[in-house]
Amino acid sequence: MSTDIPDVSGITIGILGGTGDQGKGLARRFALAGHTVLIGSRSAERARDAAAGIGAESGAGGAGGAGGAGGTVRGADNATVAAEADVVIVAIPWDGHRSTLESLRAELAGKIVVDCVNPLGFDKQGAYALPVEEGSAAQQAAAVLPDSRVVAAFHHVSAVLLLDPEVAEIDLDVLVLGDDREATDLVQALAGRIAGVRGVYGGRLRNAHQVEALTANLISINRRYKAHAGLRVTDV
C-alpha cells in the first residue's frame, strides 16, 4: 500500500445520527485518537447527553469541555454539526437517509461526506439487502448532495467492539470507496486513526452496493458463531 498518507490529526469529525450505537462507537474511537468529534442528532439535547457519556468514558471533554487524554466530544443538532465539522460521517437509520441529507444539502456543500449506512431489511430468516433506486446508500447520498464529496466507508465496523472499553484494538480493514482520490485517501487515513484498523481503497462509488449488502452476510456469521466478525484484505 502507498505510504503517502495525509495528516488528518487535526480534523474535526462530525457524526450525523451519532446517538446510535454505531455513531457513538465511532465517536468514542476518534475521540480516543485525539480528534474533536461533534455528535449530531435531530435532538440537540440527546446529542449533548451522548457526547457527555462518550467524553466521560474516553477521557475526552464532554459537551463543551476541553479534552483530557483524548479529543473533545460535543453534541448539537444535525445542522450545526454538518456546518461545523471538517468531515461528516452519515450514521443515520436508512429510513431517514434521503430526507435528512436533503435537509442538510447547504451545510454539507463542499465537504467530504462519509456514508456508512447499510440499507438492510430483517425477517425470520435474518438480514437481507434492500434494493436502492440509485444503486446504494452512498450513491443516493451523492445524488442528493451534488456539491459534496461523497465517500463510502465504515460499513463493517462492529458497534459492540467500538464501544467495548476492554477492546484496545479492532482487527479490521475498512473498505473505502469513492470517485475523488484525494477524499478517499483522507478517509483511509481517518480509518487508520482507530487502533488496529486499516483503510483500504475498495473501488469507485458505483461499487458500494455489494459492500453495503455484505453487512447482511456478516450479521449471519455473527449470529451463527456468536462473534463480531470483520474483514481483512490479504496481499495488500
Image (tube, grey):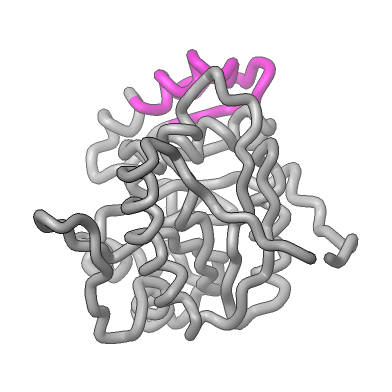
Residue most toward the left?
A: 124
Magenta-colored stretch includes residue 64: yes
Q: Name the spot of residue 212 as percent of width and height, x first.
A: 40, 67
Quarter of image, res 86:
bottom right
Range covered by the magenta-colored residues: 50-74
Quarter of the rendering occupied by the C terminus: bottom right
Q: Is residue 87 left or right of residue 200?
A: left
Q: Name the spot of residue 119 as percent of width and height, x first.
A: 28, 65
- Who's the residue at 64% across and 51% down the image? 191
Magenta-colored stretch includes residue 85: no
Q: Name the spot of residue 36 as percent of width and height, x first.
A: 60, 36
Q: Is 100 drawn above or below residue 141 in the view shown? A: above
Residue most toward the right?
A: 3
Quarter of the rendering occupied by the N terminus: bottom right
Q: Name the spot of residue 87 as percent of width and height, x first.
A: 57, 56
Q: Is 52 drawn above or below residue 227 in the view shown? A: above
Number of numbered discs on residues = 0
Q: Nearer the viewer, residue 100 or 175?
A: 175
